[in-house]
Image (tube, coloured by chain):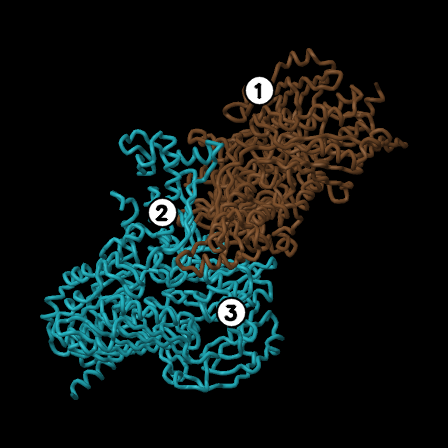
Chain colours: A cyan, B brown
C-alpha cells in the first residue's frame, strides 16, 4: 500500500450514484429503438411434454404480427463456460429439440408491432403436446429409467472426491453426528426483473444485443454459437442493472437467443421483457439440495471425518450445475482441516424451472449443513462453538487441498474475535434471558468463499487505461456492475495506481465491441480479478508517464513520486511537473511524440484466494407462534482490503438480509411442476422493516496476490447467515432445524416433537 | 508487401456499404433521444454590429420554451489545434463578447419542446443592435484602422518566407510573367448538410455529443475547453456522415457548444439541425484568395524565381486561416525546385461567413495560380508544358525545403507519362480540330499535396487490435469515416498485417470514450497516419500470436507463416495450427493464460510524404456562348500504394467533379454581406449529368514510410482540376482566365478583349 492512499480504502461516492438517484441511469427496459418489435413467449403449460405441432396460422393473419420463432428452430443454450473450450464440446452447448421440460418452458415466440398484438397473437397459437411423465423430484428422476429428461439421462453430473481415509476417520472418532439437511429453491428476486433485452440483427450481418448480463463477453460467445455468427459480428451491451445475484451469469432462458432470432427474421430491433411472474416461473433459481452429512470428531474437539452426500435439483435445464456442486466441495473442504473427507455430489434433472447461479453458488447450502454439524458437535462436546471453530479451521500457510494452493491471507481468527467482542458473544451465550414465550439465543457460524474461479474456469480479466491531455483518464473495461459498485472500485484502483484523483477517472460502458476480454462479474471476483487487470494496466500507463517525466525532470524514474496530480523528485519537490502539463506536452505540444499514454492488461488472476467471515446472530423465538425475530447480525468479514469500505459494508448489509430470506422465508413452492408463489405477494422476500440491527465489521488480512491486498466479499456475506441463525435458534429454543427455510411451522413442529420425547 | 496479399491492393466491398444501401446507417439527423429538446438559432441580420440587448421575455412566456443561450454567455471557439498546445494559448481559443461579425452569426439559441415552438420563440425575441461599418473586402479591411473586426485588428495572420535571393532570381530570368489570380468562396455542399448534433449534459456532469465531426478527439478538446469540463467528462460520438470535405474539421460555428450549453441548463438532450440555407449562409467555406504571382524562367525552361503575394479572405471567423496560408507555401514551394522563392501570405478578417478547411486547404487556390503561370511560361517559350514540368519538379531524393524532409517516393513522372499516353496528349495538343464556334483544347497541370500534417500540427494516431477466441478481430479506432471509406481501408491493413481474412475484422464506432487518441480525418491522412497506427497495433498482436504459435508448434517465430487463417512452419506446412484454435486455447482452454491478445499503438507518423498527380483536361468551348463543356479528365495520381483501388478511383472521380465545380461554377456570391445563392437552386453544384468521361489512373510509387507503401489521395485529386481546365481553355481559345469560377461570361469578356486588341 502507498503511505498515504488517495483512493484505496476511502468511502468515495459511487460513480453511478447521481445517475441512479436522478433517474437518468438507463436500464434495459428504458431502451427504446426505432421501428422496434415487441416479442412475447408462449410457454408450456406442461412440466414435461413433447411438442407435436405448432400451428401459428391464425396468429399469422393478425395485423401487426411479424415473425415467429419456435423451439423446433431456435437452439437453447444448455451448457456454459467449460464447453467453450473445444469445438467438439461447443456442440453440446446448444440443444434444438421438441421437448418442454418445465411449466413455463418457452415453446414459441412471436414478434409484433406492439405488445397488445403480441399478446393477442399468443392466444391464437395452437400447440399440440404429447404429455410425458413429469419427474418432480430428483430421487424419482434418478430411479426412473424409462423417462429421460435429457437424452443422456436424468443424472446431469456426478462428482466423487475422497481425501484421506473416511473409514479410518470414523473409526477414530469419539463422536459421530449424522443428519440430512434440505435447502430451498431460493429466487434472486432482483429489483429489476430478469428477462429484458433488445436484439437487433442488422442488414450488415451484425447482431447487437442490449441485455443485463453479468458476463457480457461470455454472453457474446453463447449468442455467437447459438446463431452461428463469428464473434466480431456479435456485440453485447450491458445497460445499468438492478441487481443480478448470479441470475444473469449467462443468457436468460428463452430471452436473448429468441429475440436475436426474431430480429434476424425481420431485420428490426426486437424487444422482449418478462413479467415478474415469468421471472419467478421460468428463470433460474438456487439449486435445492439434500445434503446427508456424517461428521466425526475426537472428544477434544478435533474434526477428523466428514462424509457428504449431496443431491442437487437441477430442474429442467441448469447451466451451472457442475460449478454449484464443485463449490460445495471446495468450500466444505477448504474451510476446515478435516483429514478424512468423502464427498459425493449428484446433480439431477427434474421437471422444474432451471437451477442456476445464486449468490454463494453451492456454498449457502453446504455451509448450512456443515456449520450445523459443527455446532451440534460443540454442543455434544460442551465446547464453545467459537473455540471448536478456532481449533479446526485451515490457517494461514496451510494448503487448500481442493484448489492445491497455499492460504496466503486469512483473517478468520480476527473476524471471530472482533465479532465475538462486538456482539458480546461470551456473555450472551451464557446469560440470555428466557422469559415467557419469547426465547432469546445467540449463534455463530463461519464461512470461506473463493474469490473468482482461479484456474477452475476460464476467468480472463482485462482493462485499458488511457490518460488524456489534461491528465484525466478513461478506463475501458467490460467489468459488469450489477449495482454493487464494482466500477467505482475499479476507478479507485486506477486512481491509486496512477496517482491521479478519483474524480478524473471515467469508466467506460460495458460493451463487448470496444472492451477487452473480461469474463465478467461472478464469484465475488471484480475487485480482485478485475482489480488486478486495472492495476496492471494502470501500472503500465504509470511507468510510461514516469519515463516521460524522468526525461523532462532529468531524474531517474525511481527517484520520482506522484502526488496531487503532479510528478516530482522525491528529494527535491521543486523539481516538479503537473501530470496535465506533461500529458499536454506529450500529446499535443511535442508534435514529434503525440502519444496518448495507454496501459493495457489481459490475463488471469494468479490465484483464487479464499475470503472469510464470521456471523454472530441474535434471535428471539416466540415458542407459541414459532416466529423468529432476528435482533442483530454481527457480520465480520475478511475482505483482504476494503477498497471502498462503504461498498463493502453495503454488501455485508445486503447479504445479511438476503441470507435471512434464505434462512427464514424464501422458497419457490412447486406443486406438480406449478410454482405456487410467483409474485412478491406470495414469495416472501424480506423488507427493510424486517431488517435487524446489522453490524458490519471489516477485517483486512492483506491478500498478497490481490490489488492493494483486496479479495472478495459479494457472495460470502450471505453464505453463513442461515447457519448462524439456525445455531441461534437452537441456542434460544433447543430446537435444531434441518430444513430451509426455517418457518414458524417447522419450529412449532420441532418444539412439539421435543415435547413428545 | 507480402508476396500474395490477402487484403491490401484489393477492391474489397466497403464495410458500410450494406448499411448505406439499406438505409440502416444512422446519420446525426436520425438520432432521437427521449425527452429531447429542439434548438434553433437566431442569427444576425447585420454583417457587423454590436449586440446591445437581447430581450427574451416574450419568448419565455411561450409554453414549451425551456432555455436560452446567448453570445453574452456562450463562448465561440475561434482558434484550433495549435492553441491546444499551452494553457496560455488555450485562453485565446474561446471568445465571449457582444459582437456579430457576419450575416448569419448566431446571437441567441432557444431550446423548446418541439421545432415549431422553437421557431415561434425566435420570432418573439427582440435583439437591439448597434450596427457597425461592415468590411466586405480584405483590402478595405486591411486599410481600415478604426473598425476592428477582432480586437487584435483585421489582419488575422501574416506569413513571410524567402528561399534564395528573389531579386537575383529575377535578374537572371529571361522571361518574367506577372499576373493576379482570384479564387472563389467555394462551399463544401455536402450531401448531408452541416449543422446537426445532439448534446446531452447529464446530471452526473458528463456531456455526450453526437456530431459528425472529422476530428472527434479534437472536438472533444474544444468542447471541454468551451464548457470548462475535464476531458474525461466529455464524450464525442460520430455517427455516419454524408460527406465533410474539410468542413467538419472541428466544431460547427454555433452548433455543438450552443447545444451543450442549452443541455447543461435543462438537463435534457438538445438537438439542433441547420437548414440547407443555414449551412450555406453560416458554416465554413473555402478562403477566397487574391494571388499576385511573378514568375521568372530562363529561356531553356528553368524556373528560377517566384514571388507570391496572397491575400486570403478569412471572413468573420476562421479557425483554419493559418494552415490554409501555410499550405499555399508548402505546396507551391514543394512542387517545383525554384531556387529563389518569396512568399507573403496575409489572412484578413472580413464581415463574411467563416472561412475554413475545404478539400485541398490552400492548395487549389495556389495551384490554380502557379500552374497557370507555368503554362504561360511554356507558351511563351514555345515548350511542351509537359516537358517544362518534367524539367522543374522536385524529384525523388531531393529535399523539400518547407518540410525539411527528403522526398522518398515520387511517381509524378509516371503520372505524366501514363496520363499523356492515355489522354493522347501529344496528338491532341497538336491536332485539336477547331470547327465553327466550338473550339477544342487539351491542357494539363500537376500537383503535390502533403499526407497528414507531419510535425506541423499535433497529428496523433492510434489504434487497438483485439483478437477474439474464434480468430475474428475487433479494431478500435477513432478514425472518422466521412463517407470516403477509410474504415474499410484500415480494416484491410489490419487484415493484411494479421493474416486474418478481411471479413473477420470489425471496426468500432467512432467514440472518444473508448478509442485511443487519433487526431481524426484531415489532410488526406487516414490511409497513411491512421494506417500506420493500425499496422503497428496489428503487428504487435501478430507478434504475440506468433509467439504463442511458436510455443505450440515448437518452431521459432521466424520460421512461421500466417495464411488462410492458419499458422504453419514455412518448411513443413503440416506443422500447422488454425488461428481460431490457437486463440480459443489461449483465451479459454488454457485457464492459466486466458489472454486476449491485444495490440495497441499510439504516436505520430514519421513524415508528411507528398503525393502527386497530373490531370489532363479536354474541353470544348463555345466561343459564341462562352460555355465550357468538359469532354474528358484523365487523372493520374501517385498514391504510394492503393490499399483499395476502388476507393482510390472513387476519390479521383469525385475529386474531378468537385474540382470542375471549383473551376467552372461554384461560388458563394456575397453582396453587402448577404449571400445571394444559399440554395442548390442558386449555388450551381455540378451533377452527374455534368460529369465528363473521367479516367482515373493509379500510380504506385511505394512510399517507404507508409503502411504497405500507401500515402494520400483524398484532397489532391481535386486540387489541379481548375488549373488543368484553365490551361485547356487557353489551348482551345487562346483565352487565359485569372479568376475562378471560369464562367461563360468571363470567357466571353476575355474573348471580346482579345478581339479588341
- Label drawn at residue B160: 1
Q: Is residue A146 left or right of residue B371?
A: left
Q: Give the residue displayed 30% in from the left and 62% down from the top.
A: A404
| Marks 2 and 1 belong to one chain | no
From the viewer's side, name the closer residue of B47 and A438: A438
Most extreme residue toward the bottom is A756
- Labels in figure, total: 3
Q: Chain of mark 1?
A: B
- Label drawn at residue A549: none
Mark 3 to mark 2 CA distance (whole Å): 40 Å
Q: Is residue B79 left or right of residue B745?
A: left
Question: Do residues under tags 1 and 3 come within 8 Å of each other at their CB atoms?
Answer: no
Q: Give the residue displayed 79% in from the left and 22% down from the top.
A: B383
Q: Nearer the viewer, mark 2 or mark 1?
A: 2
Q: Nearer the viewer, mark 3 or mark 2?
A: 3
Please name the residue that numbered disc 2 is placed on.
Answer: A494
- Label drawn at residue A91: 3
Where is residue B573 drawn, in percent x and y? 57, 55
Task: Name the element at disc 2.
Answer: helix
Q: Nearer the viewer, mark 1 or mark 3?
A: 3
Whether B224 is drawn above or below B427: the answer is below
From the viewer's side, name the closer residue of B118 and A227: A227
Mark 1 to mark 3 CA distance (whole Å): 72 Å
Local crowd at mark 3 within 10 Å, few (<14), some, or many (≥20)?
A: some
Where is residue B99 drawn, in percent x and y? 52, 31
Residue A562 visible, this angle: yes
Mark 2 to mark 1 CA distance (whole Å): 49 Å
Q: Chain of mark 3?
A: A
Task: Name the element at disc 3.
Answer: helix
Amino acid at each position: 500500500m502507498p503511505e498515504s492512499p488517495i483512493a484505496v480504502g476511502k468511502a468515495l461516492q459511487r460513480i453511478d450514484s447521481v445517475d441512479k438517484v436522478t433517474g437518468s441511469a438507463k436500464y434495459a427496459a428504458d431502451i427504446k429503438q426505432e421501428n422496434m418489435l415487441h416479442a412475447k413467449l408462449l410457454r408450456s403449460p406442461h412440466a414435461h411434454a413433447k411438442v407435436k405441432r405448432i400451428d401459428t396460422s391464425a396468429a399469422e393473419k393478425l395485423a401487426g404480427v411479424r415473425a415467429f420463432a419456435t423451439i423446433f428452430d431456435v437452439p437453447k443454450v444448455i451448457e456454459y463456460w467449460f464447453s467453450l473450450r473445444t469445438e467438439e464440446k461447443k456442440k453440446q452447448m446448444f440443444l434444438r429439440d421438441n421437448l418442454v421440460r418445465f411449466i413455463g418452458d418457452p415453446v414459441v415466440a412471436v414478434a409484433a408491432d406492439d405488445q397488445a398484438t403480441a399478446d393477442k397473437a399468443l392466444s391464437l397459437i395452437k400447440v399440440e403436446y404429447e404429455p410425458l411423465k413429469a419427474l418432480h423430484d430428483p430421487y424419482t428422476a434418478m430411479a426412473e429409467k424409462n423417462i429421460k429428461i435429457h437424452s443422456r439421462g436424468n443424472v446431469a453430473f456426478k462428482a466423487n472426491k475422497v481425501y484421506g481415509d473416511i473409514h479410518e476417520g470414523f473409526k477414530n472418532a469419539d463422536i459421530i453426528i449424522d443428519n440430512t439437511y434440505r435447502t430451498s429453491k431460493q429466487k434472486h428476486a432482483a429489483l429489476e426483473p430478469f428477462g429484458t433485452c433488445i436484439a437487433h440483427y442488422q442488414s450488415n450481418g451484425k447482431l447487437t444485443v442490449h441485455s443485463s448480463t453479468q458476463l457480457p463477453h461470455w454472453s457474446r460467445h453463447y449468442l455467437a454459437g447459438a446463431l452461428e455468427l463469428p464473434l466480431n459480428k456479435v456485440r453485447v451491451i450491458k445497460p445499468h442493472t438492478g441487481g443480478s445475484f448470479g441470475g444473469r451469469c449467462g443468457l436468460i432462458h428463452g430471452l436473448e437467443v429468441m429475440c436475436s432470432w426474431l430480429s434476424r427474421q425481420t431485420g428490426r430491433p426486437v424487444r422482449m421483457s418478462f413479467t415478474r411472474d415469468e421471472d419467478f416461473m421460468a428463470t433460474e433459481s438456487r439449486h435445492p439440495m439434500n445434503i446427508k452429512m456424517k461428521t466425526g470428531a475426537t472428544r477434544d474437539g478435533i474434526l477428523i471425518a466428514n462424509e457428504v452426500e449431496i443431491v442437487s435439483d437441477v430442474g429442467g435445464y441448469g447451466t451451472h450445475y457442475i460449478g454449484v456442486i464443485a463449490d460445495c466441495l471446495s468450500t466444505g473442504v477448504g474451510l476446515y482441516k478435516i483429514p478424512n473427507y468423502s464427498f459425493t455430489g449428484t446433480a439431477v434433472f427434474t421437471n422444474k424451472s432451471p437451477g442456476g447461479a445464486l449468490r454463494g453458488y453451492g456454498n449457502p447450502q453446504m455451509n448450512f449443513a456443515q456449520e450445523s454439524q459443527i455446532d451440534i458437535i460443540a454442543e455434544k462436546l460442551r465446547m464453545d462453538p467459537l473455540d471448536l471453530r478456532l481449533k479446526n479451521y485451515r490457517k494461514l500457510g496451510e494448503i487448500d487441498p481442493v484448489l492445491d494452493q497455499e492460504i496466503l491471507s486469512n483473517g478468520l481468527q480476527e473476524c471471530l474475535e472482533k465479532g465475538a467482542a462486538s456482539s458480546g458473544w461470551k456473555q450472551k451465550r451464557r446469560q440470555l434471558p428466557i422469559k415467557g414465550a419469547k426465547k432469546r439465543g445467540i449463534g455463530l457460524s463461519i464461512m470461506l468463499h473463493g474469490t473468482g474461479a482461479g484456474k477452475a474456469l476460464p476467468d480472463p480479466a482485462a482493462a485499458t487505461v488511457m490518460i488524456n491531455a489534461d491528465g484525466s483518464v478513461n478506463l475501458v473495461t467490460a467489468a459488469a456492475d450489477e449495482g454493487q459498485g464494482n466500477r467505482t472500485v475499479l476507478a479507485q484502483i486506477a486512481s491509486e495506481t496512477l496517482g491521479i484523483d478519483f474524480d478524473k477517472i471515467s469508466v467506460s460502458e460495458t460493451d463487448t465491441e470496444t472492451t477487452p476480454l473480461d469474463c465478467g462479474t461472478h464469484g465475488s471476483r471484480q475487485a480482485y480479478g478485475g482489480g488486478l487487470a486495472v492495476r496492471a494496466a494502470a501500472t503500465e500507463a504509470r511507468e510510461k508517464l514516469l519515463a516521460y517525466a524522468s526525461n523532462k525532470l532529468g531524474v531517474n524514474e525511481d527517484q520520482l513520486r506522484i502526488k496531487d496530480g503532479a510528478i516530482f523528485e522525491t528529494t527535491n519537490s521543486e523539481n516538479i511537473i503537473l501530470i496535465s502539463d506533461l500529458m499536454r506536452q506529450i500529446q499535443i505540444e511535442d508534435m514529434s511524440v503525440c502519444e496518448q499514454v495507454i496501459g493495457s492488461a489481459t490475463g488471469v488472476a494468479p490465484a483464487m484466494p479464499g475470503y472469510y467471515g464470521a456471523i454472530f446472530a441474535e434471535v428471539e423465538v416466540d415458542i407459541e407462534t414459532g416466529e423468529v425475530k432476528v435482533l442483530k447480525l454481527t457480520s465480520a468479514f475478511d475482505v483482504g482490503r476494503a477498497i471502498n469500505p462503504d461498498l463493502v459494508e453495503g454488501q455485508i448489509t445486503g447479504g445479511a438480509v438476503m441470507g435471512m430470506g434464505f434462512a427464514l422465508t424464501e422458497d419457490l413452492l412447486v406443486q406438480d411442476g406449478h410454482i405456487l408463489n410467483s409474485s412478491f405477494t406470495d414469495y416472501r422476500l424480506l423488507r427493510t422493516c424486517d431488517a435487524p440491527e446489522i453490524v458490519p465489521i471489516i477485517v483486512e488480512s492483506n491478500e498478497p496476490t490481490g490489488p492493494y491486498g483486496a479479495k472478495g466479499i459479494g457472495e460470502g456475506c450471505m453464505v453463513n447467515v442461515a447457519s448462524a441463525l439456525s445455531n441461534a435458534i437452537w441456542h434460544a429454543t433447543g430446537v435444531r432445524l434441518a430444513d430451509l427455510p426455517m418457518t414458524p411451522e417447522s419450529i412449532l413442529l420441532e418444539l412439539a416433537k421435543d415435547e413428545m420425547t
